[in-house]
């Protein structure tokens, strides 16, 4: 494992993110560690990373248990979450980025022991393979969960198509930003909706330019780190 390469990759990512500020704020970098082991996560932590993203309940739980010594680590669950898996993770995570359907909200409300910070996932590109609410239904749905007191809608999340052009990416991210602003303006106590989770290794620079406040970056951290 080439730790110098890991540091260089991280600095490159942070330089890009730090060069764009929204209202003076720099986007939070979530290191998506779903493809790496706990040793690599400890190395990231050594380099100053505090936000970790995982997308498999069993893997997350296993790593979480092994990494309790990472003081002030912040845990993001970013993947599809089956209803039956909610109870396994919901009381350990700090953020859920993938609140993508009403039945999931219902189960979270039932299983959570305190308020869970959630991003509502929106399918802005309309791809059949992507989960999430349709843009035209998300505002009304968020309003309808005001009495789910275990859910705080901190923002919106989206995933762009793999091979989207820059123009298409700007359109999708811009649309999510518009929706987020619209919901924020409602002033709903249960849905402050100030945050935007968008951008991955392929497109995080465009995402921060379009207003992302959380980016979820995996592959870009680990390029060349395992070579030799
Ligand atoms: C894997 C994953 C990422 C990170 O993707 P990379 O291309 O490796 O940066 C971000 N968000 C979600 C939801 C993911 O599943």
Image (cartoon, rainbow, N blue to C red):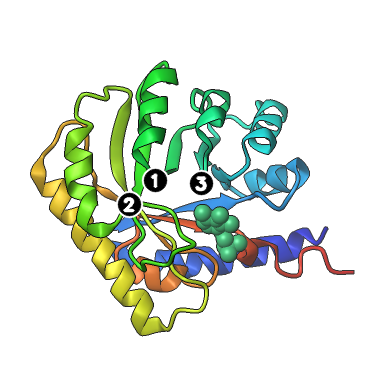
Q: Is residue 164 left or right of residue 178?
A: right
| x, y percent for residue 105 | 36, 32
Q: Is residue 15 left or right of residue 156?
A: right
> In the rendered structure, which disc, 1 or 2, sits on the residue that comes first in sequence?
1
* Numbered marks: total: 3
Which residue is label 1 attached to?
100
- Do the CB atoms of the residues marked 3 and 2 lie less than 8 Å apart? no
Splitting the image into four quadrants, where does ligand 1 fall? bottom right
Look at the numbered disc 1 and give the secondary structure of its residue: loop
Look at the numbered disc 3 and give the secondary structure of its residue: loop
How many residues crowd around disc 3 within 10 Å: few (fewer than 14), some, or many (20 or more)? many
Mark identifier at residue 141: none
| Farthest-out residue, top | 113
Label 2 CB, ligand 1: below 8 Å? no
> In the rendered structure, which disc, 1 or 3, sits on the residue that comes first in sequence?
3
- Look at the image and tell me whether residue 189 can be seen: yes
Q: Quadrant of residue 191?
A: top left
> In the rendered structure, which disc, 3 or 2, sits on the residue that comes first in sequence?
3
Quarter of the image where the C terminus is located: bottom right
Q: Is residue 40 above or below residue 104?
A: below
Q: Is residue 54 above or below residue 218?
A: above
Which residue is label 3 attached to?
78
How many residues crowd around disc 2 within 10 Å: few (fewer than 14), some, or many (20 or more)? many
Label 3 CB, ligand 1: below 8 Å? yes
| x, y percent for residue 158 | 39, 58
Q: Is residue 114 above or below residue 188?
A: above
Look at the numbered disc 2 and give the secondary structure of its residue: loop
Which residue is label 2 attached to?
133
* Real-space Cα separation, disc 3 to disc 2, in angstroms: 16 Å
| Farthest-out residue, left | 186
């Amino acid at each position: 494992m080439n730790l110098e390469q890991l540091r260089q990759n991280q600095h490159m990512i942070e330089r890009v993110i730090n060069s764009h500020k929204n209202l003076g704020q720099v986007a939070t970098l979530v290191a998506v560690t779903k493809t790496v082991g706990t040793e690599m996560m400890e190395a990231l932590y050594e380099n100053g990373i505090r936000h970790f993203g995982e997308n498999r309940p069993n893997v997350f739980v296993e790593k979480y248990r092994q990494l309790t010594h990472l003081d002030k680590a912040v845990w993001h669950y970013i993947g599809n979450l089956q209803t039956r898996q909610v109870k396994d993770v919901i009381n350990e995570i700090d953020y859920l980025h993938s609140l993508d359907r009403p039945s999931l909200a219902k189960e979270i409300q039932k299983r959570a022991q305190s308020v869970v910070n959630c991003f509502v996932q929106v399918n802005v590109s309309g791809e059949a393979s992507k989960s999430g609410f349709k843009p035209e239904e998300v505002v009304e749905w968020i309003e309808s969960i005001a009495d789910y007191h275990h859910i705080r809608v901190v923002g919106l999340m989206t995933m762009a198509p793999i091979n989207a052009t820059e123009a298409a990416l700007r359109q999708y991210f811009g649309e999510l930003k518009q929706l987020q602003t619209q919901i924020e303006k409602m002033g709903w106590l249960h849905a402050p909706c100030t945050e935007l989770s968008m951008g991955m290794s392929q497109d995080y620079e465009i995402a921060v330019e379009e207003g992302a406040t959380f980016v979820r970056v995996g592959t870009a951290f680990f390029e060349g780190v395992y070579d030799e």
